[in-house]
Image: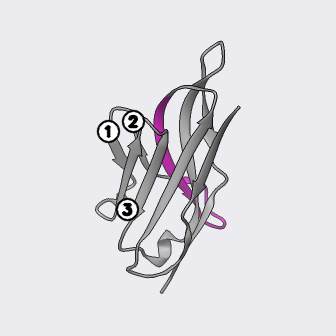
Amino acid sequence: QVQLVDSGGGLVQAGGSLRLSCAASGSILSINSMGWYRQAPGIQRELVATITNGGSTNYEDSVKGRFTISRDNAKNTVDLQMNSLKPEDTAVYYCNAIIQTGRAGLWRAYWGQGTQVTVSS
């Protein structure tokens, strides 16, 4: 079994910062892309940022220049540093990873349980 545990959310004023962390554990053979998604009430889950095992990053336009994604391949962790937070960043943030597991070496997507980020104006 593979598990993703994300943490680090909370309540912050506009302009403040938060750092989200996610750790993957279990019977992991390899991890490809890792990333963060978010979902606000009544809105479809959307990509925030991703990072490949080679370190290539991709960001949603509204977070470029404010958020930074990083990962530690040795520890199977991915972090999201969020600066200059805005009320519209309020959402539940989910960690995601594409992981190879098992004897067959199958790849599939795994999700964390989600962590709430609330930005007050």
Q: Which residue is mark 3?
A: 63
**Mark 2 surroundings: few (<14), some (14-19) or many (≥20) residues within 10 A:** some
* Amino acid bearing label 1: Ser
Q: Residue at x 62, y 38 (%)?
A: 110
From the top left corner, tell me how far across and down residue 25 is, in percent.
Answer: 60, 38
Q: Is residue 28 magenta?
A: no
In depth, the one of 43 and 69 nearer the eye is 69
From the top left corner, tell me how far across and down residue 45 is, in percent.
Answer: 59, 54
Instruction: Establish if 86 lies above or below 92.
Output: below
Q: Is residue 32 magenta?
A: yes
> Circle 3 — which element?
helix
Instruction: Establish if 95 lies above or below 24.
Output: below
Q: Which span is picked out in magenta?
A: 31-46
**Cα–Cα span, label 1 and label 2:** 5 Å
From the top left corner, tell me how far across and down residue 115 is, in percent.
Answer: 61, 62
Q: Residue at x 32, y 59 (%)?
A: 64
